[in-house]
Amino acid sequence: MENKAVFKEFATEFRGEMILPEDDQYDAARQLWNGLYDRYPAGVARCESPQEVIAAVNFARENDVMVAVKGGGHDYAGNSVCNDGLVIDLSPMHKVEVDEHQKTARVEGGATVGQFDAKAQKYGLATTTGTASNIGIGGLALGGGSGYLSRRFGMTIDNVLSVDIVTAEGNLVKANESENEDLFWAVRGGGGNFGIVTAFKFKLHEVGPEVLSFQAYFPYEDSGLVLQFYREFMRKAPDELSCYAFFLKVPPVEPFPPEYHGKTTCAFIACHSGNPEKGRAELQSLKTFGNPFLSFIQPMEYTAIQKSFDAGMPKGLRWFTRAHYLDKLSDTAIETLIKNTELLPGPFTVAYLEPMGGEVNRVDLAATAFPHRDAAYSLHIFPGWDDPSKDGENIKWAKEFSRAMQIEATGGVYVNLLSQDEKERVKAAYGENYDRLARVKRKWDPDNFFSMNHNIVPEG
Ligand SMILES: Cc1cc2nc3c(=O)[nH]c(=O)nc-3n(C[C@H](O)[C@H](O)[C@H](O)COP(=O)(O)OP(=O)(O)OC[C@H]3O[C@@H](n4cnc5c(N)ncnc54)[C@H](O)[C@@H]3O)c2cc1C
């Protein structure tokens, strides 16, 4: 039967919503957060239950159809939509159930960070998630997951207690410390290679409802001093404090002084999630450093600080990415960062250092498949623009900047920050765990059915 007819027939049997190219919702269903990718699947199966996920997996396997799995649709490499194949869209599966006594949450595989944070905060609880509310928990938690709480509570993967996962064979299995341990190890850092997670169980911690937000924006000319100070500050920073060092263009809005609008600034953007009095004291030296043209410290709801980057990263723009891990911030690294950020190409372009350390660094290297725990910083070079005619200059800037930083970097890269054109860096993302991951892949997905991801080839 012709591909189109096969999909039509499946649509009549599928119990969830099946969206085909002729349907009104098709364009919305195939669009990703990153407007750089424009793909046309043969169908989008919107699943509301594990049974529907199983039906979609079985249909695709039996008909030799390519599969892409979509959680929050925020993959930088656009892996959650494929051409011609089937998109298994988990977004209707976003239920979050909190057990406030056990301090755990059961989160369906299509929930977003914002949905998870909002529900957990009703009980004064949270766990490490990313710093943008529309990212999917699925992609985040399978690749690693870092954010304002990771220095305090470890990465998102360090807080996963169990997963329910649909395998390539179409079986729904559990993976945790006592069941399918190899799979449990692999899904914590190995991405979507091993199956479709229909639900995660997370460990939660007491957080908020308010945390301390601190931001300071410095004239670009001060960047060298700012980063030297940052390096020293982060060496001694407590686990409750996470401070990012950002290069960005000053937004043309109040309260930013008009004379800085559109200019590059070097900024501290920090969150202290512990005791507020202690937080104010621990932020004191950041607060009094240098001559920022704007700075503020204020209590903020945890759910609000988690959304504070959303406006700067809207859906549908064009985004490109390059990333590195750094084990230190050397003088040369600082010089290279400054040299490459004076003229940021796109209106939404940023480059930032995210601090690692704290609890991320204390978790045993062998405990999960994430291999970059020893790094001190994650560097993200992240151009954002809207005009397709500017693709070339934005991508070129990121590539040249990345190349210049390479010598200062560990050689590793966060799998969730890889771009589509970086096939040769996939092994570096899984690092020393690659061979073990490939063996687990061989056991659970020998035919590489789940290949639309930063792929681990089944072998070993
Ligand atoms: C604006 C923005 C901010 C970000 N901030 C952070 C941050 O603060 N910290 C951080 O660590 N990362 C961050 N990231 C990176 C983010 O973790 C990845 O982009 C992640 O893959 C997004 O997950 P998703 O479910 O939205 O993506 P999708 O595009 O839906 O999926 C990404 C990959 O995961 C697979 N996948 C998704 N859900 C499942 C599932 N349930 N089962 C099996 N496979 C699945 C997909 O097949 C695909 O290969 C950010 C990304 C963006 C775009």
Image (spheres, grey):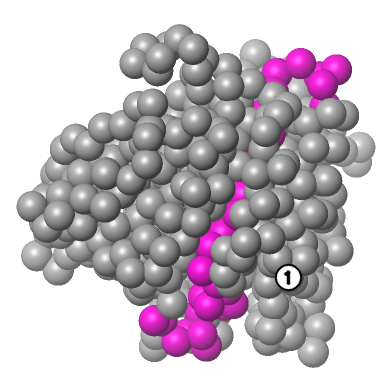
Picture quadrant of residue 105: bottom left
**Residue 42 location (% of width, % of height):** 78, 34
Looking at the rendering, in which quadrant would you find the N terminus?
Answer: top right
Residue nearest the observer in this picture, 8 or 298:
298
In this rendering, would 192 be left or right of 179? right
User: Measuring 63% from the left and 31% from the top, which residue is drawn there?
Assistant: 349
Q: Position of residue 422 (x, y in %)?
A: 82, 55
Q: Amino acid at mark 1?
A: Gly
Graded by Cα atoms within 10 Å as few (under 14), some (14 to 19) or many (20 or more), the crowding at tag 1 reads some
| Disc 1 C-beta below 8 A from ligand 1 | no
SS assignment at label 1: loop
Q: Is residue 84 left or right of residue 222?
A: right
Residue receiving disc 1? 411
Q: Residue at x 37, y 12 (%)?
A: 254
The magenta span reads 362-391
Is residue 340 among what the camera can see? yes
Q: Quadrant for residue 294, please give it.
A: top left
Q: Residue 443: x and y, percent?
A: 69, 83
Query: Which residue lies at the image location 56% right of the left edge and 35% below the top edge?
Result: 221
Please state the horizontal and vertical placement of residue 192, each as a whole percent of the image. 62, 61
State the quadrant of the C terminus.
bottom right
- What residue appears at the point 87 percent right and 29 percent down from the top-left corner? 392
- Residue 380 lies in the magenta-colored region: yes
For the residue pair 119 and 224, the one nearer the viewer reads as 224
Residue at the extreme right of the image, as rendered? 2
